[in-house]
Amino acid sequence: MTSTTTLDKPVKAPTFRHVSTGRRIKNNIATGLVTLCFVIALIPLVWVLGLVVTKGITAILSADWWMNSQKGILPDQTGGGVYHAIYGTIVQSAVASIIAVPLGIMAAVYLVEYGRGRLAKVTTFMVDILAGVPSIVAALFIFALWIATFGMPQSSFAVSLALVLLMLPVVVRSTEEMLKLVPDELREASYALGVPKWKTILRIVIPTAAPGMISGILLALARVMGETAPVLVLVGYSKSINQNIFDGNMASLPLLIYQELANPEAAGRERVWGAALTLILMIAALYLAAAGVNKLLTRNR
Amino acid sequence: MTMHPEVTAVGSSNSTGPRAAGDTANMPTEPKIDKAPESGRVGRLNAETIFRWLATAAGATIVAAIALIALFLLIRAVPSVRADEVNFFTSTEFATNDANHLRFGIRDLFMVTVLSSVFALIVAVPIGVGIALFLTHYAPSRLGRPFTMLIDLLAAVPSIVFGLWGFLVLAPQIAPVQQFLNDKLGWFFLFSDGNVSIGGGGTIFTAGVVLAVMILPIITSVAREVFALTPRAHIEAAQALGATKWEVVRMTVLPYGRSGVIAGSMLGLGRALGETIAVLVVLRTASQAGEWSLFDGGYTFASKIASAASEFSSPLPTGAYIAAGFVLFALTFVVNALARLASGGKVNG
């Protein structure tokens, strides 16, 4: 007790040591590498999109491109349009979604609202597996079932059936996510009023989840629109419009690109890039629509 | 989602209508009160049953679809494999022109498929993990969402467009890189001379790079989701011990997210194995079988099937391709099941 502690300087030596050079260098290298990874990923994105836009813009700027088909156009001739292919792409994916959307929504309702026990577990597992089925396998399956076994001709409807398989897991998953987000209080309030479960689902749960479901469906549609493997296996290319979805060849944008790729003429290349840009624009429109739906419909909640 | 069974029950089947009080319903001595509202309840009960039945049927359809895929592919494949004159698993031939003398085997297809996919995976996984780390822990939080959307945009580009890019633009550009690797490391089997010329760039190497770009978004998105879930407490504990940012990531984020990285990689591998059109456009055909070099050409399962699609007419030759398709289906089934297993049953791709 003899010595008096003076508090004008720290009692102990400072314990904080600065980060050693080695650790600092390691940290900086890691930061640099991680940022570099992100930049690397942007290279192909910018490269691909820039390429498609610059090479395809000349073709799609003509009015013919959107209004005409390739009927009567020779491989080395420029001109003509891709109206027939746009028509085919839209019809095929629309028919697919007519089948896949109700089925997918009901499956998601089953998984979220009713699914108990083994079937529900197996179904969740199979949704994951179906999401991983390669498009060519889906196409082969429809070929084996619809064309080889049932003896149907190659047609745009067969393509739609294959697209259903590819679309289903995406629809089921996004719907499932959205249904799970609906608060339980809403369901309970509905039950408390004596509304039966099925009516609660149809009138309360699904409308609440609708904006998210719709945008999920649009994204699923965007995904199957660019699928090439099913059209390659299940339908032939045609240069003009085919109104019959159950028979005959029908063009679609991916198929047109693949066909014209075999055409060595400059006109063919122009059509290839033009069609690629058209396809990307259609997909971009669906993405924008999905974002818009989400924004518009959720605004007044 | 947690449902409340007791609430459900009141709403649906056990409901005794507004008239019946809860306690009277439990009394077996007064059946009249139970019966009275029944006529009014029949329609409601039916609607409920029908709706539940419809939903269950939709769920079962998905299970049935997978079973049917396996079944129908097998039905069509077995006669062709029976008629095969060489061993289905070890032959490198794939001659189906003569329906009476089918000679087809999947060894070469398997080699090209696995080599290109694994190469793509080796390229894509480190980059994908890096991007996921960048998005979750490095990027300024205000830019996190737009940056994530940019990466997701990669997934929106159709595969045929990637094929175009790979075949017409990328292949000539990276041919010198391949030539360099071939010259310097040619003694190693992966970089030895392949069965196609490197000049045009239509090699497994090019296809692998294109595939890597295509599977990058899925690896990133799965890894990102898991990294973002790293418990705050772990990170803060590491920070309190004076860890640098990288040490925090290495000690908390990476160990916590390992299962997600594995699951994402498996999903990416599944995509790469089944990718059809980009590979078909990029890869050059080879006259002889490859020897596990990155500079080989040839066909993957998927691109072989797609290349022959216009000739699917007589059942036996077609069956040969369907057999190849079945092998691909089995392969992706296993890979996707492993992905699910690795993530404990929660993957979102």
Image: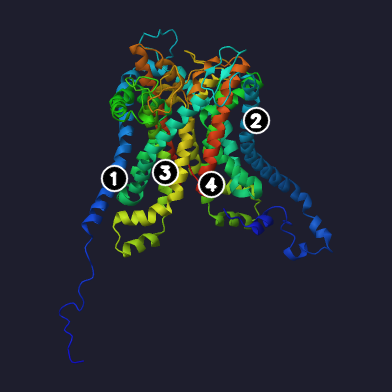
Between the residue at mark 2 and the residue at mark 4, the CA separation in whole angstroms equals 24 Å
Q: Which residue is mark 3?
A: B221
Vertically, is B297 above or below B225?
above
The numbered mark, 2 or 4, whose residue comes first in the sequence reads 2
On the image, the x and y values in percent for residue B183 come to: 29, 26
Please provide percent x and percent y for residue B319. Answer: 60, 21
Label whose residue precedes the other's in the sequence (3 or 4): 3
Say which label, 3 or 2, has the lower sequence index. Answer: 2
Please say if B185 is above or below A82: below
Mark 4, Cα crowd under 10 Å, few <14 / some 14-19 / many 20+, is some
Q: What amino acid is found at the position of numbered circle 3 in the picture?
A: Ser
Asked if marks 2 and 4 touch (Cβ < 8 Å), the reply is no
Amino acid residing under circle 4: Leu
> Please, what is the three-letter code of the amino acid marked with disc 1?
Leu
Labels 3, 4: one chain: yes
Residue A33's label in the rendered image is 1
- Closer to us: A263 or B243: B243
The residue tagged 4 is B341
Query: Does label 2 lie on the same chain as label 3?
Result: yes
